[in-house]
Image (cartoon, rainbow, N blue to C red):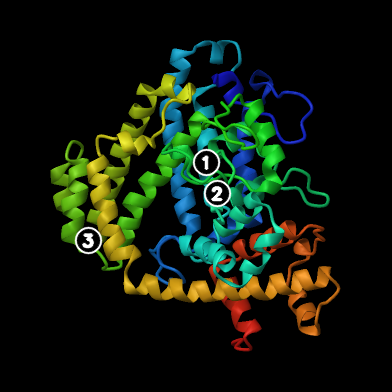
Amino acid sequence: MNWEQLLSLRRQGDTSKRLRIEQDDTRLGFEVDYDRIIFSAAFRSLQDKTQVIPLSKTDFVHTRLTHSLEVSVVGRSLGRLVGKKIIEKYPHLKEVHGFHMNDFGAIVAAASLAHDIGNPPFGHSGEKAIGEYFSIGKGKQYKDQLSKKEWQDLIDFEGNANGFSVLTASRPGIEGGLRISYATLGAFMKYPKESLPKKPTNDIADKKYGFFQTDKKFFQEAAEDMGLIPNKRGDDIGFERHPLAYLVEAADDICYTIIDFEDGINLGLVSEDFALEYLIKLVKDSIDTSKYKTLTTKEDRISYLRALAIGSLINDAAKVFIENEEAILKGKFPFALTDKSKYKAQMDDIISISVKNIYQSREVIEKEIVGYQIIQTLLDKFITAYDNNFNATASNFDKLILKLLPERHHLEKEDLYGRLLHICHYVSLLTDGNALELFETINGKKRD
């Protein structure tokens, strides 16, 4: 792979290349990507989607929106640190093509901003609830009518693939979705493969999948335009990662490791003693002990340690990337950057405490159970109504249910897979609160 292709400003539907040297620096294409994402309805819905605690009313607990903004800030810093070194190593990128170190920051910031845009309500349990509706629930009846890859898309419903669809899928009058630049889409693609074969290798890029069968054609077009390296045979589609996807992943890893831990501390799920024990290990080289001793509240002390910890992890991740940049360009780096971090043991310890005390806390489990019931009920009612309507067998109740669909979801899908995925997509874009309200309406328990 080469950086000239990887930093493509091309957008879906373009018939010619966009050259960086011809860009207006006051309205750079990569920054336009950021703007289009942040003004999108799908991004706004993240303000009421679970990060750690579903349906939480506590003001200091992060939602998907605040998490995404923080990941974007960390991603921008990572991109700029790496971009500075890349421009120094390959001066022609600036001298001939006009690229700047901040371009890398803008790409990674935009991709990081969008990294959770396709996640369903109620956190990762929402993905599982959709998948299990098909694998072991009422949706199992559709299996024999779908191809193996279509079926795998549904039973392993994946927020990353759904996010790619949010960013790129066309609808009447809106061609190419948000029309994000290929470079930003490349950085967004953490798992540049289809749902089958499932985990064919231990390579980090094969851990999950990155696009639905409906989006395969454009995914392949974008990947080939950027010069990503194909790594699958026959009819299977897959590529080595865009190098900047490693930075998006690292930004996410850093934020959820440290900030979810901070949420757990502020909620009282993790003791401050644990925080001190684990965070101090990350900041021992940068902490100002005298300043730390002046902080009188737990919140201020944890905030100070959190900021230093994130700074340590950003610098380390950038260092790992630069040290392995040539292997990454050759598609020969099958790890996450944090896997090779000098702080890996400390991060693993923090994650272990978070899993035990936060992600498996009674409050989280109880609300995830509610989320399962909500999502599976909505899928069942809307899929049944949508499919019956297509087959001209809709009951009056089905017709009433379909009137609850927003206007932009009133689309006709000729194939069963398209219909099933369309409703999954609709449910996935609901906020936690919207999903709960719809569930109560359908069950006759609507509150005043």
Please tell me which of labels 1 and 2 falls first in the chain: 2
Q: Is residue 151 left or right of residue 136?
A: right
Mark 2, residue position: 160
**Tag 1, which secondary structure?**
loop
Residue 336 location (% of width, % of height): 39, 37
* Residue situated in front as seen by the camera: 119 or 90: 119
- Alpha-carbon distance for marks 2 and 3? 36 Å
The residue sitting at the right extreme is: 392
Q: Write the residue at 53% across / 22% down.
A: 100
* Residue situated in front as seen by the camera: 143 or 56: 143
The residue sitting at the front extreme is: 144
Q: Write the residue at 16% across / 52% down.
A: 277
Compared to residue 48, the image places residue 172 above or below, namely: above
Q: Mark 3 touching mark 1, by CB under 8 A?
A: no
- Alpha-carbon distance for marks 3 and 1? 39 Å
Q: Mark 1 touching mark 2, by CB under 8 A?
A: yes
Mark 3, residue position: 298
Please tell me which of labels 3 and 1 falls first in the chain: 1
- Alpha-carbon distance for marks 1 and 2? 8 Å
Q: Residues within 10 Å of mark 2 (few under 14, many from 20)?
A: many
Q: Is residue 175 left or right of residue 159?
A: right
Residue 74 location (% of width, % of height): 42, 41
Q: Write the residue at 64% across / 22% down.
A: 20
Task: Indicate which disc residue 191 carries.
Answer: 1
Task: Say which amino acid is labelled 3.
Answer: Lys
Task: Say which amino acid is labelled 2.
Answer: Asn
Task: Say which amino acid is labelled 1.
Answer: Tyr
Closest to the camera, between mark 3 and mark 1, is 1
Q: Residues within 10 Å of mark 1 (few under 14, many from 20)?
A: many
